[in-house]
Amino acid sequence: MTYKLLGNGDPVRLFVGGLHGNEWKDTSDILEKLEPPAIGSLAIISTVCKEKYISTLEEKYYSTVGKPIIQAVEELKPDIYIEFHSYSKQNKKSLTDAERIYKAGVPAYSQLDNDVLLGSVSPIIRKKYFSMEALCLSFEIQKDNPQSKQYGAKIANKMKECLSRDDFIEKLKKRYPFQASKVIEDYRNFYGL
């Protein structure tokens, strides 16, 4: 077993951090501090890989360093899948660039508070392993930014209590109406819904 399991039952959530390079330094402890959810279960892979940087947008990621993620997804069949990444300040513009869909093949991240970004996970894992009803998100925490990390931890605590995709969308609409509209539109356009 490559994950730590907290709680039991449905909904099943899988949170992963430290996906590549040295991201684990910014994200792993956030996941390790999580308590069991009030309802359902939460599986955590706090550190996928500590050394290599292979983009999750590359197919080979999931057949090499990302294998533990695929094994957990196949075993658990989570309703909610969340990745916690970190980014350098100088990369923010490329991650939030409206042209990212044409440059990287995926929609741009949306800016939340304290330089935390919200986006989709790689279409490679999203399309192959999850139903359209599943909630699959990626949060990016800015490196060397204590407020960003603190806010990322707050988001992780809220997300562990999320019950479904629709539950998340309703909460997002209340807190971030503009970003919610963008995320929904990007999702529909990207997946052809």
Image: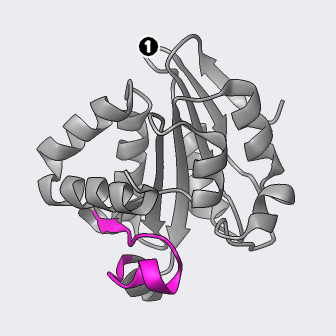
Q: Is mark 1 on a helix, strand or loop?
A: loop
> Residue 186's x, y, as percent?
33, 62
- Residue located 65% across and 28% down the image: 77
**Who is closer to the viewer here, 80 or 16?**
80
**Who is closer to the viewer here, 143 or 116?**
116
Check if residue 8 falls in the magenta segment.
no
**Who is closer to the viewer here, 65 or 25?**
65
Residue 142 to residue 122: above or below:
below
- Please say whether residue 162 is visible from this viewpoint: yes
**What residue occupies the far front of the structure in this picture?**
192
**Who is closer to the viewer here, 25 or 71?**
71
> Residue 42's x, y, as percent?
57, 26
The residue under label 1 is which amino acid type? Ile
Task: Say how many tags the image has.
Answer: 1
Mark 1 sits on what residue? 39
Q: Residue 149 is drawn in which quadrant?
A: bottom left
- Residue located 29% across and 29% down the image: 167
Q: Residue 9 is drawn in which quadrant?
A: top right
Point out the stretch of residues depicted in magenta.
Answer: 96-111
